[in-house]
Amino acid sequence: MSDTLLEIKDLKVHFPIRNDSLFGGVENYVKAVDGVSFHIEKGETLGLVGESGSGKTTIGRSILRAIEPTGGKVTFNVDDESIDLSQLSDKEMRKFRKHLQLIFQDPYSSLNPRMTVRDIIAEPLVAQKLAKGKEVDERVQEAAALCKLNVEFLRRFPHAFSGGQRQRIGIARALVSNPQFIVCDESVSALDVSIQAEILNLLMDLQEKLGFTYLFIAHDLSVVAHISKRVAVMYLGQFVELAPTKSLFHAPKHPYTEALMSAIPEVNPDIAMTPVELKGEIPSPINPPSGCRFHTRCTYTQDICKIKEPVWKEVEPGHFASCHFVDTLNLQGVEMSSPAKSPLTGKN
Ligand code: SF4
């Protein structure tokens, strides 16, 4: 039996831009995700990092089929079966959803203010008909206890809680259906640093206890490093680097990764780097730059970068990057005993 839970091949999500004519013809496409391939092992956390507009959230939602992919294949290995999600009917997909969950970014807007905490956590069980009657309450209480929520809280409404407690409610809702795979979409970004640490520790504890597999999406590389076994760096709809976390931090192979790393605040003297300039804003995904998409902002750009697209290459075992000069650039890394030992959580 394979250890791979999820396999993505050549995933594309292109959103049509329609013109103002009577028939609303398509005049162009926003290429939010443009040919991305990767896998996630069972029980692993894969971090996905990049600036706003890089396509990270679209990847997460298209895996969950909350957004319909334009092309490519998403395969899950669940219950000794390989399931190609694109082949599932709507009814089959509804049934399959119990294996998939999402933890949202905003703990304020993601909880319905008119529902009690008990009803919010119970929602996936009721909507997917996974339990009824007394069993619903038992499973809600079990999920709340796992997320260190007092049973008294279940009768209250979300407005009575702080951001961290609300995020615990969101996590309890995600785990109550006992999913195999959870997308954490900027799940700690809206929280204070001390609360971020609590939530990251909770997610790691739950993974250890229950074996969850996470795709952890964030724009902050230092947060991703805490929780992830491997990290993928995304730029303008494509992956530019994918590597084990330690390898990515010690010896990044793509200039964009180096620039993101150099922007990490120097909370820990071990992670201080000479700043690398990231020129301007991320370009539009409607008309991405020719050649290497990063060439308009890269410190190391040469003529070939403007005309030829670099290939996705395995530079070391498990370490992939796409840059013409991947073998010759000597990029700055971070000398940390363990990149996952975090100024946030203090955990290895
Ligand atoms: Fe920079 Fe050129 Fe490498 Fe792209 S291919 S990352 S522009 S050096």
Image: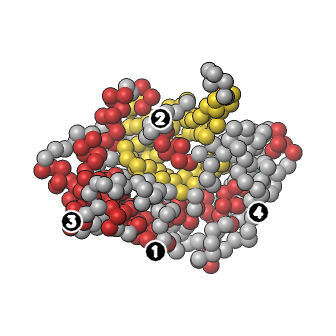
Query: Residue at (20%, 59%) from the top-left corner?
Result: 141
Q: Is residue 301 above or below residue 155?
A: above
Q: Earlier in the sequence, mark 1 or mark 2?
A: 2
Residue at the spot of label 3: 151
Q: Tell me: 249 left or right of 276.
A: left
Against 60, residue 253 (above or below) is: below
Q: Quadrant of residue 128?
A: top left
Point out which mark residue 12 bears: none
Residue 108: x and y, percent? 42, 60
Q: Give the number of the disc on residue 74.
A: 2
Residue located farthest toward the left when viewing the structure as drawn: 134
Where is mark 4, residue-wise?
277
Residue lying at 74% horizontally and 59% vertically, measured from the top left: 278
Distance from disc 1 to disc 2, alpha carbons, whole Å, reads 36 Å
**What kind of element bears circle 3?**
helix
- Report x, y in % for residue 2: 40, 40
What separation in Å lies between label 1 and label 3 (alpha carbons)?
A: 24 Å
Q: Nearer the viewer, residue 162 or 219?
A: 162
Q: Secondary structure at mark 2?
A: strand
The residue to which callout 1 is attached is 194
Earlier in the chain: of badge 2 and badge 4, it is 2
**In the picture shown, does residue 195 fall above or below 141?**
below
How many marks can you see? Answer: 4
